[in-house]
């Protein structure tokens, strides 16, 4: 989880310093998509039997990751749909 927190801290620091550009926001979202896809893949390919309680937790985690992936992808689509002329540049 350190990777996620480092990313958040860098974005927060950057946002305090200046407005993020469209490409920076998209790059950050692509990074989060990649992290979530990698985590999802690791969970789904793990064939260890953890018992029914942990299997339920595993399925919940898979659902959460899928939700986040859909959310990040929808944000990418939305941001990409905004014309450059509508974005305020500093």
Image (cartoon, helix red, strand yellow):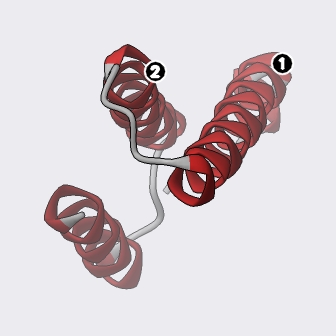
* Viewer-side label of 1, 2: 2
Position of residue 48 measured from the top left corner of the image (x, y, whole percent):
30, 29
Vertical order, 70 against 71 (above or below):
above
Give the image quarter of residue 36: top left
Vertical order, 11 against 25 (above or below):
below
Decide: marks 1, 2 in contact (CB < 8 A)?
no
Vertical order, 59 against 11 (above or below):
above
Q: Which residue is mark 1?
A: 81
Residue sitting at 45 percent across and 56 percent down? Answer: 20
Looking at the image, is mark 1 or mark 2 earlier in the sequence?
2
Vertical order, 15 against 85 (above or below):
below
Q: Count of labels shown?
A: 2
Residue sitting at 34 percent across and 20 percent down? Answer: 47
Q: CA distance from mark 1 to mark 2?
A: 32 Å
Position of residue 19 measured from the top left corner of the image (x, y, whole percent):
47, 65
How would you rate the neighbour count of disc 2 (Cα within 10 Å): few for under 14, some for 14-19, many for 20 or more? few
Residue sitting at 65 percent across and 31 percent down? Answer: 69
Nearest to the observer: residue 75 or residue 65: 65
How would you rate the neighbour count of disc 1 (Cα within 10 Å): few for under 14, some for 14-19, many for 20 or more? few
Position of residue 45 measured from the top left corner of the image (x, y, whole percent):
36, 15
Q: Which residue is mark 2?
A: 44
Looking at the rendering, in which quadrant would you find the N terminus? Answer: bottom left
Helix, strand or loop at label 2? It is helix
Furthest-bottom residue in this view? 16
Nearest to the observer: residue 26 or residue 85: 26
On screen, residue 49 versus residue 1, left or right, reads right
The circle on residue 1 is none
């Amino acid at each position: 989880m350190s990777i996620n927190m480092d990313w958040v801290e860098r974005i927060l620091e950057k946002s305090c310093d200046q407005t993020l550009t469209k490409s920076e926001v998209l790059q950050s979202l692509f990074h989060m998509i990649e992290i979530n896809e990698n985590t999802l893949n690791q969970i789904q390919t793990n064939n260890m039997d953890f018992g029914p309680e942990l299997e339920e937790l595993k399925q919940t985690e898979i659902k959460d990751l899928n939700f986040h992936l859909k959310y990040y992808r929808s944000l990418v689509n939305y941001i990409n749909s905004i014309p450059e002329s509508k974005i305020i540049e500093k």
